[in-house]
Image (cartoon, helix red, strand yellow):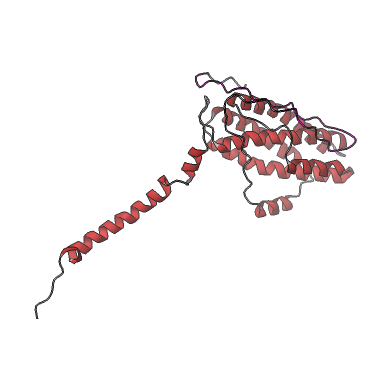
Amino acid sequence: MRSIRGSGLFSGTGLVIAGLVATLAAMAFPLWSYADRSGTGVDALNAGTVSTGYGPLSAQDRDFVTKVRLAGLWELPAGQQAQERGTTEAVHTAGEHLVEGHTFLDRRVRDVAARLGLELPNQPNEQQREWLGTLGTARGGEYDVQFANILRRAHGKVFGLVAQVRANTRNSLVRDLADYANTTVLDHIEVLEATGLVDFEALARDAAGASAPPLTVSPAPPGPTVSPGLPVPVSPSPARTYPLPPAATSPPPRGPTEAPRSTG
């Protein structure tokens, strides 16, 4: 009986060609799926980024600027409180560093926000008000412990964000602000740990069980903005009020051709 040979697509040559085509398609699929498809990291970055005279401003950049302002709105009053209520010299010193660091950093962040046309909050968020409330009811040695651990935990969480923004931002103003924030946060971590009251085991457990925090993104610059209202005073203690930093203002962003103002 004469053997039957395949022909066309189902011949030996056809099968080899079909195999090569399938291999090339499989190799090309990841490139289409992950590099160019909508919803990827690059796509999300571009979608949340706006142009400014100081370089692209991403959603993460705006989140960072907002969080720097929020940090000062509660840590500055907490530092003032520690200078009065702390029972050890180390706690007093930590309070002084908080006040000095956030007074300086708050001036910087308000300047950056004004030049980028960003709106800033004028009162602490709900979590921060709870922390101030906890400190406001503590006394004596218990106050020292609560102060050292609440503030150290908060600084540890923001430390990673500062490093990430500094490494990735394309905006020169945000980059400079991250430099200042990195120096300030590290200094505060060191003086809080110098109190000898930080529970490192609790910090490790907290970090292990933590999930990624949601973004608190400041709105993209819409052009001229209305200045926010006066800050709402926060009173950690019924007996004493600790003033907040000055209210943030948001004048129109500067033109793209204007050279950045020195931050030195």
Q: Which residues are magenta?
A: 229-258
Which residue does the image show at 56% across and 37% down from the upper left? 59
In the picture as drawn, the residue positioned furthest to the bottom comes out as: 1
Within the magenta stretch, is there residue 16? no
Q: Whole-percent x and y of residue 49?
A: 51, 35
Q: Height in image: 224 above or below 97?
A: above
Indicate left or right for 219 with 231 as reference.
Answer: left
Write the residue at 76% across / 49% down: 199
Magenta segment, prevailing SS (helix, strand or loop): loop
Q: Is residue 106 left or right of residue 50?
A: right
**Is 145 above or below relative to 2?**
above
Specify whether residue 182 is in view: no
Q: How many marks?
A: 0
**Quadrant of the rendered structure where residue 101 is?**
top right
Q: Nearer the viewer, residue 149 or 72?
A: 72
- The magenta stretch spans residue 236: yes
- Between 56 and 250, the one lying in front of the other is 250
Quadrant in which the N terminus is drawn: bottom left
Residue 173 versus residue 53: which sits nearer the camera?
A: 53
- The structure residue drawn at horizontal position 50% and vertical position 42%, both measured from the top left corner, is 44
Q: Which quadrant holds the C terminus?
A: top right
